[in-house]
Image (cartoon, coloured by chain):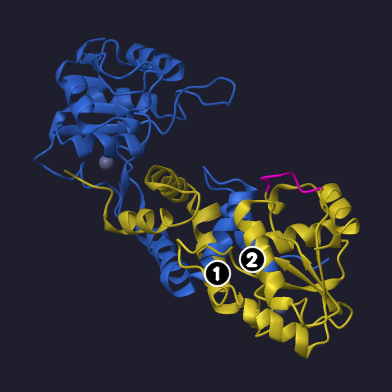
Chain colours: A blue, B yellow
């Protein structure tokens, strides 16, 4: 049999590792790239090379950054005494799109899961507690999803923050049950943030 | 507001143009790339650059190729008197995985659609007829999907092939109604091919 050819096979194999793409959609995407060489394949190869060279995760908060610290952590106008804890960078972006939070962030990078071996350490929860103590943070807002995993994670984060002196709050019940932050419109996010309450 | 940053924004914008990825899944995929720089982002950028440099579509049949003609068109052991007409390269791969067809291909690159401006010319159907005449092809197997668009396209291809002297056949009714070739298992494809009948 004559397969797709080794260059294309390698591309398909790597594309299939992206979240949201299975082997079949990876094949379709690879073919779309070959067909749109100038307008999609070359620009995408270039954009990836640039991101690989210039972008990493902020060593303080876990946001994407073009240096050791991200634009939010280095922005002196952002309130360093309020931290918003989110599951993922996409959630941080959703909050920034809403434009109502002027503090800083801690990106967990997931939710706790004993099954998948996700520990408080791998989500840098001890570092969060240390940061709260060191930087004199007065409020930590738990802006995690209203999912079971999200709420379990929120409780563990709150436990770690006990004794730090910071008030721990969570988003108001504007977040639909079972919903993920990244899906919400700006209005819902704003309302949930303003009506936040003690955790 | 602090956005994702221009490099990441550019990457997300390009990823969102891939079939199967919307804006939201493009964001998730871009983040997955940043988090897996060494194991996914750099290899993928490299694989894309290589495909961009080395892979194009075969000028004879429309399959992917690392030269002007693909591995199947240049393989002297493949029967040049039998052509299999498929909608897409992914369908060609599905037939090759089944391993039962030893002829060559004509990849249409889609199905006819007056609405989307897809004409017989843009699917290179006149070229197919010319190729059948020039190369003394004895059989053209219409291996298109059992969808309405696929069947309309098959009828138009058959019309173009009238008077070429080639027998026009289609896959046996092993292809589920409404089904696309690329989803089928090898056994179904083999059975449909062996039981092919006059169109
Ligand atoms: Zn940061
Ligand atoms: Zn070819």
* Percent position of residue A50, x then y: 38, 64
* Percent position of residue A30, x then y: 57, 61
Q: Where ligand 1 lies, by image quadrant?
A: top left
Q: Residue furthest left?
A: A77
The residue indicated by pointer 1 is A34
In this image, B103 relative to A170: left or right?
A: right
- Is B56 above or below relative to A109? below
Quadrant containing the C terminus of chain A in the rendered view: top left
For the question of whether residue B24 can be seen, the reply is: yes
Q: Chain of mark 1?
A: A
Quadrant containing the N terminus of chain A in the rendered view: bottom right
- Is ligand 2 closer than 8 angstroms to the Cβ of mark 1? no
The residue indicated by pointer 2 is A8
Q: Which mark lies nearer to you, 2 or 1?
A: 1
For label 2, the SS is helix
| Predominant SS of the magenta segment | loop
Magenta segment range? Answer: B174-179
Residue shown at 13% from the left, 33% from the top: A102
For label 1, the SS is helix
- Is B178 above or below relative to A33? above
Q: Chain of mark 2?
A: A
For the question of whether residue B88 can be seen, the reply is: no
Q: Sequence-wise, which precedes: disc 2 or disc 1?
A: 2
Give B4 or B77, whichever is nearer the viewer: B77
- Mark 2 and 1 residues: CB-CB less than 8 Å, in contact? yes
Residue B178 magenta-highlighted: yes
């Amino acid at each position: 049999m004559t397969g797709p050819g080794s260059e294309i096979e390698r591309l398909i194999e790597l594309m299939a590792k992206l979240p949201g793409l299975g082997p079949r959609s990876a094949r379709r995407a690879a073919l779309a790239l070959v067909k749109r060489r100038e307008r999609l394949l070359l620009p995408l190869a270039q954009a990836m090379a640039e991101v690989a060279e210039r972008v990493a995760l902020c060593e303080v908060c876990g946001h994407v950054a073009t240096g050791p610290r991200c634009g939010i952590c280095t922005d002196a106008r952002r309130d360093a005494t309020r931290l918003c804890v989110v599951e993922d960078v996409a959630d941080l972006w959703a909050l920034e799109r809403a434009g109502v939070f002027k503090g800083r962030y801690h990106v967990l990078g997931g939710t706790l899961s004993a099954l998948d071996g996700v520990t408080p350490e791998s989500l840098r929860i001890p570092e969060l507690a240390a940061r709260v103590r060191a930087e004199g943070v007065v409020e930590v807002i738990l802006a995690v999803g209203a999912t079971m995993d999200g709420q379990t994670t929120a409780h563990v984060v709150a436990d770690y923050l006990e004794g730090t002196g910071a008030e721990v709050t969570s988003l108001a019940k504007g977040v639909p049950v079972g919903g993920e932050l990244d899906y919400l419109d700006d209005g819902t996010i704003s309302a949930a943030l303003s009506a936040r309450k003690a955790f």
